[in-house]
Amino acid sequence: MAQTKNQQRAAHAVAAWMAQHEWNNTQLVARAEADPGTIGDFLNGKRWPKIGTQGRIEKALGWTPGTLRSIAMGGPAPDLAPAVGARHDDGAEPDDSLRFRRPAGLTDEQWDQVKDKVRGIIEWQIELTVRER
């Protein structure tokens, strides 16, 4: 059965997440341990996945359980927050070995608090490493 408009919004949100993270259908199939036909049909708007498959898709994307169903009921899609990466003081390109993505469900204030805590830990570790030289 074809998807409703809101179910299509959910499929588009998954596809947007996949594009941002440079995933293809095969990667989602593997991470969600789902049938390739089900994933393809879901992303192409042909059918809506069963609840268990929805949960596996959400888990694979790091989304809160129930996110797809919420979108399908007219709720908001998760924000696709940009990666937070470290920059060198010398203006060099970002260090891609240190990258975090904002989990769905965190407010701006909560995310800022997490980044501040992590920044402190990283700065402390850098200081210890420099002292050891």
Image (cartoon, helix red, strand yellow):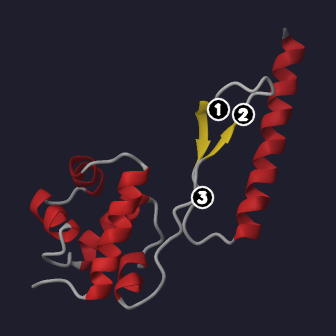
What kind of element bears circle 1?
loop
- How far is the residue under mark 2 from the one under mark 3? 18 Å
Q: Are marks 2 and 3 in contact (CB under 8 Å)?
A: no
In the rendered image, the quadrant that contains the N terminus is bottom left
Residue 5: % across, % down: 28, 87
Q: Mark 2: which amino acid?
A: Arg
Image height of 93 relative to 40, above or below: above
- Which numbered disc covers residue 9? none
Crowd tier of the residue under label 3, counting other residues whose Cα lies within 10 Å: few below 14, some 14–19, many 20 or above:
many
Please tell me which residue is depicted at 81% across the width and 19% down the height of the picture.
Answer: 129
45 shown above or below 1: above
* Closer to the camera in the image, 87 or 52: 87
Q: Considering the numbered disc 2 on the image, is that residue within a helix, a strand or a loop?
A: loop
Amino acid type of the residue tagged 1 in the rendering: Pro
Please give the name of the residue rendered at 46% of the width and 66% of the height, measured from the top-left corner.
63
Whichever of callouts 2 and 3 sits on the residue coming sooner in the sequence is 2
Q: How many marks?
A: 3
- Can you name the residue that lies furthest to the front here? 91
Q: Which residue is pictured at 38% across the width and 61% down the height?
A: 16
Instruction: Please state the horizontal and vertical placement of residue 20, each as a whole percent of the image.
Output: 43, 52
Q: Where is residue 34 in the image (x, y as percent from the top left)?
A: 19, 60
Q: Which residue lies furthest to the bottom in this view?
A: 73
Q: How far apart are marks 2 and 1 (CA)?
A: 5 Å
Q: Mark 3 points at which residue?
A: 102
Which residue is labeled 1 in the image? Answer: 94
* 2 vs 3, front mark: 2
Q: Residue 87 carries which label?
A: 2
**Which residue reaches farthest top?**
133
Q: How crowded is mark 2: few (under 14 residues within 10 Å), some or many (20 or more)?
A: few
- Mark sitting earlier along the chain (2/1): 2
Q: Nearer the viewer, residue 62 or 73?
A: 73
